[in-house]
Amino acid sequence: MGERTIRVRVPGTSANCGPGFDSLGLACNIYNDLELTLLTEPGLQIEMLGEGAGLIPCDERNICWQAVKLLLDKAGVNEFHGARISMMNRVPLSRGLGSSATAIVAGLKAANVLIGNRYNRHELLQIANEIEGHPDNVAPAIYGGFTISTVTDGKVECFSLMPKLRLELVVAVPDFPLSTRKAREVLPDKITRQEAVFNIGRAAMLTAALVRGNERFLRTAFDDALHQPYRAKLIPGMYEVFQAAKEAGAVGANLSGAGPCLIAYVPERLCAAERVGEAMCEAFKKSGVQSEARIMSLDTRGAHILNH
Ligand code: HSE
């Protein structure tokens, strides 16, 4: 019988990185794994394990399955009528760490391998962006590292780089979810020139400082005027947590994607990640938010196959 199985691993991601709304992102060493079997007979069996199990739809609406189906349709492959999907999720769901991007990228990557790698990573990125609507999570999920993405008439260009500076990523994960849709609804349609200038300088400074490994210039580079001020009302204590992280040794902190996770960047040489995590959770607590700290580092590999 026509049955093919593949396992892929995809990193969680943190989008925006402060000033780079919908443009900058980075991959974290926290992973969701997918085992996909394409079947020639009809039928869909979906199993979700780990983070968010029970909350993720296990039918036709499943986003990983949607991605598989879209890729097969685009490639004109019509020999498969069913699938078995099993995902082991370690990336917290609806917290701003790119869980939906992992499902999309995992589905695309796995299906692509099973049909003989018809698409390269750049082409997979176009399809992933079509599904997600913005590239800043799917790009680092595919490429790993720190990514800069632009979209022109729907076409994504992405540059992935490995910073010259070793930073630990300290993420405070609050105990409540926040949908990206809700966190986008609070954003204004228009911004002032002053706000645009604030972010342009920082996005450029951040990228240059990471490329050159210059810690000093990172200190103001993670700030933002385009989305965080509007989202602050959805995340009690957000600015206090940023402040606490910096006082404990972080060079900067920001909202991870659309939140509610907050991420701080700590130079590895300071050995201060644990202290920063505790300070962030303590500051959250003062605003009545329970959270847990996770210490991560940059994933440099992106989505990859686990076996054949
Ligand atoms: N750039 C997106 C946002 C990331 O901030 O809304 C969330 O998926």
Image (cartoon, rainbow, N blue to C red):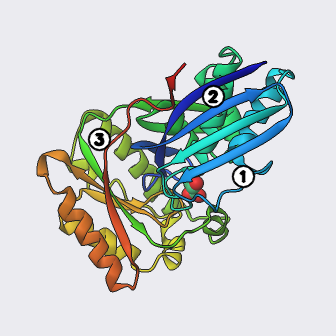
Up-down: is 248 above or below 68? below
How crowded is the residue under tag 3: few (<14 C-alpha within 10 Å), some, or many (20+)? Answer: many
The residue that disc 1 covers is: 58
Choose the circle earlier in sequence order: 2 or 3.
2
> From the Cβ of disc 3, is ligand 1 less than 8 Å away?
no
Q: What residue type is labelled 2?
A: Ala
Residue nearest the viewer, comparing 59 with 207: 59
Q: On screen, 42 above or below 230?
A: above
Task: Tell me the residue at 81%/33% (across/down).
Answer: 82
Q: Position of residue 98 (x, y in %)?
A: 53, 50
**For the residue labelled by badge 3, is the local secondary structure a helix, a strand or a loop?**
helix
Marks 1 and 2: in contact by CB < 8 Å? no
CB at disc 2 and ligand 1 closer than 8 Å: no
Which residue is at the front of the view, 75 or 244? 75
Q: Residue furthest left?
A: 270
Where is residue 195? Give x, y as percent: 50, 63
Which quadrant is home to the N terminus?
A: top right
Q: How crowded is mark 1: few (under 14 residues within 10 Å), some or many (20 or more)?
A: some
Find the residue positioned furthest to the front.
1
- As measured in the structure, the alpha-carbon distance from the residue carrying label 2 to the one carrying label 3 is 35 Å
Q: In which quarter of the image is the C terminus?
A: top right
Location of residue 232 in the rendering, given as x and y in whole percent from the top left corner: 48, 75
Residue picked out by circle 2: 110
User: Where is residue 275, by image quadrant?
Assistant: bottom left
Residue at point 50%, 22% (across, down): 307
Direction from residue 57 to residue 146 in the image, left or right? left
| Quarter of the image where ligand 1 sits | bottom right
Mark 3 — residue?
209
- Name which of mark 3 and mark 1 comes first in the sequence: 1
